[in-house]
């Protein structure tokens, strides 16, 4: 069972039980996957589980009847299901919850049905039918049910099988028998239904002596054993697929009639086997059933030879009823087994592998009966021959020739090119799939290897290489499974080696992986430096303003200018502008095969307002058959890693650029230009917290004084506005002035606007630290000088 199948089943179970909230489906899925173990069925464990459920059930007869019905149909996984149910009967808490849940669902369903019933209008008057019309209708239904219904159902089933097989064979119609084959019952070899007991004798048989009665009955039985009605023993019409019944003349002697009733089951089994052979010989039932019918026909011929020999004895007067009963004993056992197998195949509607599973299980069930087991082995070997022929073509050459859809591997028409285009493309998983009902039980453990073996060889064949397994041998059915298991393992090892050598040597898989590493994992350093230098300005634009051909040209230029020019697969590298950012891409991957997938697929990518840096990614062109390994799923993982690393690389470049700009700004000298400095107060007042700054007008001189300490804002590094050699930090001062306007008002009333222009020559070389630069105001308009410092 695949991971997605487990997800689906768990979600369906939670929905059915109406479980909302809690731990969620993922917890239960994880528990199931960790605790999954193969179920080893035995006759004892299956029987004990069946008995336990029957004891727990309120109606054990109904349960056992249903179990036997499913068992006769060869229902798969019936015993594991019964074992699980027997375990549930031991868990009282789970049982109580299931009962309560079933009750609630029944009430909800009843309420739904009631509400819908009220909305349906009731007809005004009911239709009436007379007793005579009712009786006539009953007769018509009875006449139809006797014979025509069975023929119609068989014809309908054949038509359904034909349609399915024609569909699987791409419209190529398979051959069919003409209609007259089914319309002429005399061709079948079974009984032709007569009106009743023949009355062409002059006297009732009961009036004849016992010897005459015995002779007449022996002759009738010889006819009945080959499917022909006798005078005193006649076949009854069939009721569906039930066993044939017979009508014996009640005037026969009681002892003779009792012995006749013991012999008649052979005739009933012969009738069942004959009908099975004729029905399964139709093209629609497949080659396995054809082979089984042919093997049964061989045994039926031996039965007819026996009847002919008995008839010869009867003509010589050497065959009595007791001798007939003695000679018929071996044939009775054989015909009983054949009839049982035919009935089981009919009930289970078995085709192909399911027929072989039934025969294999029946062979094992006759372990204590050597003759019965030998008979079943003969039938299984004959029936498995066409199946093993298809299997040999698959595991030795990678070819499926299965016109009747009987093989365990089914082929689907899928384009291998989509494996490179679609993330969720399932070419490798669904081009060839395992059909569980068609897996014979003796090949169940090897099903995965059989599937992989043929797929490996098929890949090589798709590339134009003809492959033939050198260890190919004919596979023959046997109860010792090791014989063909070893053959399948040899074929698997050969197919694995052929495909691996083909990919590694001819298709250069390692070189492609190295190329992907070089670009997606940034193994080529100089290439990325060139590429990011060339595309930096272009990738800063919004994604809708970027021209993809320009990016492709820049990529080509970067490849040619770097050491990546020596890469033979550099032309497979392409530019991909994704419609979503990295986080959205991760969410889209997680939403695959969920209800949110369609909603996320329909989201408008323009709403994200992506830049080229956020949408940029590399893509890589991979051709068949490398696309089986480097498929869209693998490339998507590489893309997500690359997008994260690429954006980190961009951030690194930005940090380096900021660091370089900062180093450049620090190289500018504070005393190499004329500066606009704050006004000087009339008295040495220390403003609190560097709370004011104005650019003063000219009449002032500059000098350095280390004695005063003024709380004046520091010289900022950005932004600066230079006019000639005068630098004024207008933006910085304006921002501080707006922040502390209320505090400045009281101080500014005491300070007029003074201008100060200094010359670079009047400023001495700093002998102090840059944090202690001071200005002194010696304007004649003031009575004293003032000094203002900043650090």
Image (tube, grey):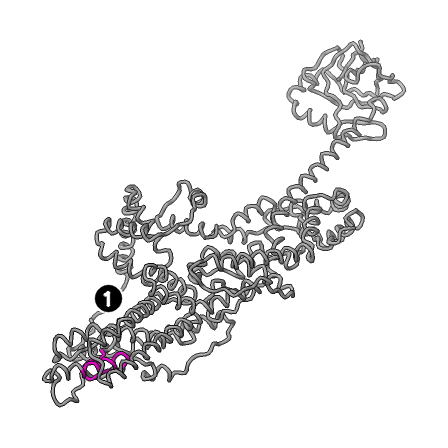
Can the viewer see residue 544 in this picture?
Answer: no
Q: Nearer the viewer, residue 109 or 288?
A: 288
Disc 1: which residue = 122
**Relative horizontal placement of residue 357, taking residue 58 as reference (left or right):** right
Label 1 residue SS: loop
231 within the magenta span: yes
In the image, the segment drawn in magenta is 215-235
Q: Residue sitting at 39 percent across and 73 percent down?
A: 295
Give the residue drawn at x 44%, y 67%. Answer: 384
Figure check: 12 above or below 409? above
Q: Nearer the viewer, residue 571 or 299?
A: 299
Q: Is residue 364 visible?
A: yes
Q: Residue at x 74, y 14 (%)?
A: 710
Location of residue 726 in the rendering, given as x and y in whole percent from the top left corner: 83, 27
Give coordinates of residue 107: x percent, y percent.
26, 51
Residue 129 magenta: no
């Amino acid at each position: 069972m695949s991971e997605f199948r487990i997800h689906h089943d768990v979600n369906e179970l939670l929905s059915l039980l109406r479980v909302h909230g809690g731990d969620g489906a993922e917890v239960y899925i994880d528990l199931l996957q960790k605790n999954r173990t193969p179920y080893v069925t035995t006759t004892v464990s299956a029987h004990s589980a069946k008995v336990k459920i029957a004891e727990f059930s309120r109606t054990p007869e109904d349960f056992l009847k249903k179990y036997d019905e499913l068992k006769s149909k060869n229902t798969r996984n019936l015993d594991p299901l019964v074992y699980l149910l027997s375990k549930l009967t031991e868990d009282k808490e789970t049982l109580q919850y299931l009962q309560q849940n079933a009750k609630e669902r029944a009430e909800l369903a009843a309420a739904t049905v009631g509400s819908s019933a009220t909305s349906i209008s009731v007809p005004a008057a009911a239709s009436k039918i007379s007793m005579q019309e009712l009786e006539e209708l009953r007769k018509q239904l009875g006449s139809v049910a006797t014979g025509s219904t069975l023929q119609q159902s068989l014809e309908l089933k054949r038509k359904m099988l034909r349609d399915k097989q024609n569909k699987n064979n791409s419209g190529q119609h398979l051959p069919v028998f003409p209609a007259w084959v089914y319309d002429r019952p005399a061709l079948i070899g079974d009984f032709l239904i007569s009106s009743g007991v023949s009355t062409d004798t002059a006297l009732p048989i009961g009036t004849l002596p016992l010897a005459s009665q015995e002779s007449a009955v022996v002759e009738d039985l010889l006819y009945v054993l080959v499917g022909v009605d006798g005078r005193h023993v006649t076949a009854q019409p069939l009721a569906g697929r039930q066993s044939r019944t017979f009508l014996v003349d009640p005037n026969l002697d009681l002892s003779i009639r009792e012995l006749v009733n013991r012999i008649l089951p052979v005739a009933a089994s012969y009738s069942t086997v004959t009908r099975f052979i004729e029905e399964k010989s139709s093209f629609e039932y497949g080659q396995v059933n054809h082979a089984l019918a042919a093997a049964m026909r061989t045994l039926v011929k031996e039965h007819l030879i026996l009847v002919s020999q008995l008839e010869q004895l009867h003509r010589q007067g050497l065959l009595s009823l007791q001798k007939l009963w003695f000679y018929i004993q071996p044939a009775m056992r054989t015909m009983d087994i054949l009839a049982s197998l035919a009935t089981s195949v009919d009930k289970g509607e078995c085709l192909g592998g399911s027929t072989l599973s039934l025969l294999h299980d029946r062979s094992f069930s006759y372990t204590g009966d050597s003759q019965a087991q030998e008979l079943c082995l003969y039938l299984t070997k004959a029936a498995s021959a066409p199946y093993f022929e298809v299997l040999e073509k698959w595991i030795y050459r990678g070819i499926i020739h299965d016109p009747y859809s009987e093989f365990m591997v089914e082929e689907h028409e899928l384009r291998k090119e989509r494996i490179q285009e679609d993330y969720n493309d399932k070419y490798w998983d669904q081009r060839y799939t395992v059909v569980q009902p068609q897996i014979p039980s003796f090949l169940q453990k090897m099903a995965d290897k059989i599937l992989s073996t043929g797929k490996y060889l098929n890949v090589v064949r798709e590339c134009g290489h003809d492959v033939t397994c050198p260890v190919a041998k004919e596979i023959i059915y046997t109860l010792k499974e090791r014989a063909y298991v070893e053959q399948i393992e040899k074929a698997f090892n050969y197919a694995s080696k052929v495909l691996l050598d083909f990919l590694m040597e001819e298709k250069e898989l390692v070189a492609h992986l190295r190329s992907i590493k070089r670009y997606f994992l940034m193994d080529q350093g100089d290439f990325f430096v060139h590429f990011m230098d060339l595309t930096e300005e272009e990738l800063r634009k919004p994604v809708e303003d970027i021209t993809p051909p320009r990016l492709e040209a820049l990529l080509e230029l970067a490849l040619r200018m770097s050491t990546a020019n020596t890469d033979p697969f550099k032309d497979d590298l392409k530019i991909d502008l994704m419609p979503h950012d990295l986080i959205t891409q991760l969410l889209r991957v997680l939403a695959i095969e969920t209800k949110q997938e369609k909603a996320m697929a329909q989201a408008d990518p323009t709403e994200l307002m992506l830049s080229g840096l956020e949408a940029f990614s590399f893509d890589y062109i991979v051709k068949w058959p490398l696309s089986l390994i480097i498929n869209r799923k693998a490339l998507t993982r590489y893309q997500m890693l690359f997008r994260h690393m690429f954006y980190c690389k961009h951030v690194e470049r930005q940090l380096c650029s900021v660091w370089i700009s900062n180093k450049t700004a620090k190289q500018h000298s504070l005393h190499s230009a004329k500066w606009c400095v704050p006004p000087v107060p009339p008295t040495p007042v220390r403003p609190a917290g560097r709370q004011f700054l104005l650019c003063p007008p000219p009449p002032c001189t500059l000098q350095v004084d280390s004695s005063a300490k003024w709380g004046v804002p520091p010289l900022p590094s950005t932004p600066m506005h230079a006019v000639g050699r005068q630098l004024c930090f207008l933006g910085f001062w304006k921002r501080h002035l707006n922040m502390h306007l209320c505090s400045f008002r009281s101080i500014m009333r005491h300070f007029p606007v003074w201008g100060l222009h200094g010359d670079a020559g009047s400023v001495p070389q700093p002998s102090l630290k840059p944090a202690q630069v001071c200005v002194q105001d010696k304007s004649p308009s003031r009575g004293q000088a003032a000094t203002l410092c900043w650090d």
